[in-house]
Image (cartoon, rainbow, N blue to C red):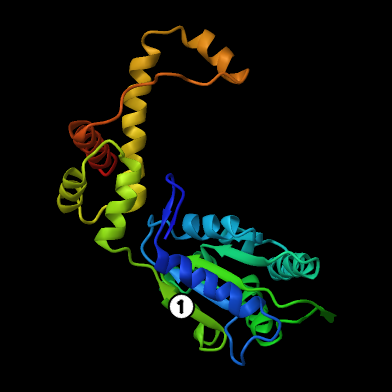
Amino acid sequence: MVNDHSVYVPERFSMVVKLHLVRNLQPDPPYNTPLLLGVHGRPGEGKTFQLRYILNLMGIHTSLLSGGQLESSDAGEPGARIRDAYLSAGSAVSNGVPAAVLLNDADAAIGHWGDLTQYTVNTQNVITELMHLCDYPTKVEGRTTPRVPIFLTGNDFTRLYGPLRRHGRMDLFKWEMSQQERAVILAGIFGSLSAAEIDKLLSLHPDYSIADWTAVAARITDVNLTTYLSKLDARILLAKIVQGARLEGVGRAPDFQDVVQAIDYLNGNIAVNML
């Protein structure tokens, strides 16, 4: 596992990322090695965060793109962005630096969502550009470039164009966190709770994503900060903060009841917002 006492990444997630990097960056990749690795799963489970953390930890030069960058009023521009990101990463490899391309929220940009889908020229260009890179990874715009692994994240890659997902172009990794992995992450978020208390939280809220739990932690921090601010002149404090001062002694480590109260507050807000 990857664990620097503040971030935990399950070993099986880390290994899939490392394997994709090594397979593609070696001088002569085996025939039919997929250029794309699609990491998909339910929202809020840390797919992109964990992926970026591993790439950064391994010193990978990462050309980052988001799904929102794959639409434009200028036809062909998003396809050009894909090529530019790939060539930029290839340039890093040429200079002896391992590199990769990371495309976030790919299914939101180029996935098929039934009647909600509006396929555009840009969508088609992005799909065909990615397939071209898979088939000719060392030839881009008539130039020779090193092969560069591409990572895509999203929620449901069964919505992607079938030929793009076929074997030899893309490997699919569906990220579903186990309860044991979830417990380790919660222990990092709520370090003052016991293992038994962590297990109880998970049993009470089995459907909570990691993003939900970080929202609970943020609510506890807000409560502590509110108490802290009630004793100070906020104007003076803000002036010190923008000058680089750090907040000291803001609240105490949360106990189990603090977490329960934060969950109740957030659930109440969700219910109000849905009315």
In this view, which residue lies farthest toward the bottom? 31
Q: Is residue 1 left or right of residue 143?
A: left
Q: Position of residue 218 (x, y in %)?
A: 36, 35
Q: Quadrant of residue 76?
A: bottom right
Q: Quadrant of the C terminus?
A: top left
SS at mark 1 in the image: strand
Q: Is residue 134 left or right of residue 80?
A: left
Identify residue type, mark 1: Leu
Report the residue marked by disc 1: 172
Query: Which residue is found at the position 64% from the left and 61% from the top?
Result: 60
Residue at image location 42% in from the left, 56% down from the top: 46
Would residue 155 be visible to someone looking at this image? no
The answer to whether 50 is drawn above or below residue 122 in the figure is: above
Q: Residues within 10 Å of mark 1 (few under 14, many from 20)?
A: some
Q: Residue furthest right?
A: 143
Residue 119's image quarter? Answer: bottom right
Q: Quadrant of the N terminus?
A: bottom left
Q: From the viewer's perspective, is residue 249 above or below residue 202?
A: above
> In the shown orientation, is residue 165 left or right of residue 78?
left
Location of residue 229 in the rendering, given as x and y in whole percent from the top left corner: 40, 14
In front here: 34 or 55? 55
